[in-house]
């Protein structure tokens, strides 16, 4: 094994080190140690420099550079969730969050008396109300707490 150095693929800031494994198939074929391929978008074999306090190592091109750690600024106020979005916006937000495919299965699993009314609302409503029984039912079944539901409505409103 050899050590590789990881960095965030977006910010490119050094994230730690890891042991890099041998590729058993290629090692056997070459009759010598061959290491698995490295994802160059987030790892390198080049060790970063010693990092002084208040600085961070950042991968720029094929080299490490030291940069000052940015001061944390006050977080911008978050948008208040809308109480109503269109069904289109809601479905796009559910799709983006990975929940859309679960909704039909959840509706199908409801008792028949409840299922028919929920399906009509899901398929034919023009808007989705944040405090509606449908949203309460689906958010509970999808294990979305109030903060996650607010984030979903904020995302939906932006679509």
Image: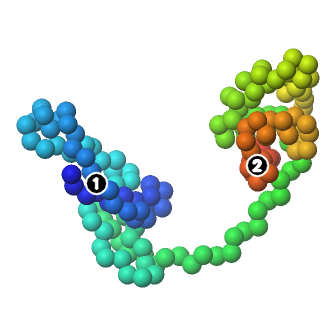
Q: Residues within 10 Å of mark 1 (few under 14, many from 20)?
A: few
Q: Nearer the viewer, residue 47 or 19?
A: 19
Is 150 placed above or below 74 here? Answer: above
Q: Report the residue at 38% width, 81% height from top.
A: 52
Is 24 placed above or below 113 here? Answer: below
Q: Report the residue at 36% width, 58% height from top.
A: 6
Distance of label 1 from label 2 (alpha carbons): 38 Å
Q: Position of residue 50 (x, y in %)?
A: 31, 76
Left or right? Give the position of 125 relative to 36: right
Q: Position of residue 58 (x, y in %)?
A: 40, 67
Judge whether residue 44 can be spotted in this image: no
Query: Residue pushed farthest top?
Result: 112
* Quadrant in the rendering for residue 114: top right
In this rendering, the count of numbered labels is 2
Quadrant of the frame with the C terminus: top right
Query: Residue pushed farthest left?
Result: 31
Q: Residues within 10 Å of mark 2 (few under 14, many from 20)?
A: few
Callout 1: helix, strand or loop? strand
Q: Position of residue 140 (x, y in %)?
A: 79, 40
Q: Nearer the viewer, residue 19 or 39?
A: 19
Is 17 placed above or below 113 here? Answer: below
Tell whether label 2 touches label 1 (CB within 8 Å).
no
Callout 2: helix, strand or loop? loop
Ranked by sequence position, the earlier of labels 1 and 2 is 1
Left or right? Give the position of 93 relative to 1: right
Residue under pointer 2: 145
Judge whether residue 100 can be spotted in this image: yes
Q: Position of residue 23 (x, y in %)?
A: 22, 39
Q: Report the residue at 67% width, 41% height from top.
A: 97
Residue under pointer 1: 19
């Amino acid at each position: 094994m050899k050590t590789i150095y990881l960095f965030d693929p977006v910010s490119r800031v050094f994230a730690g080190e890891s042991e890099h494994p041998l590729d058993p198939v290629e090692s056997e074929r070459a009759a010598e140690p061959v290491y698995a391929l490295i994802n160059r978008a987030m790892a390198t074999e080049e060790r970063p420099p010693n990092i002084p306090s208040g600085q961070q190592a950042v991968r720029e091109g094929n080299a490490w550079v030291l940069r000052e750690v940015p001061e944390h600024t006050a977080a911008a106020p978050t948008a208040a969730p809308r109480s109503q979005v269109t069904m289109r916006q809601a479905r796009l937000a559910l799709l983006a969050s990975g929940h859309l495919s679960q909704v039909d299965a959840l509706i199908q699993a409801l008792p028949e008396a409840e299922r028919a009314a929920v399906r009509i609302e899901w398929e034919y409503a023009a808007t989705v109300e944040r405090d509606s029984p449908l949203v309460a039912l689906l958010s509970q079944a999808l294990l979305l707490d109030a903060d996650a539901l607010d984030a979903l409505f904020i995302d939906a409103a932006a679509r």
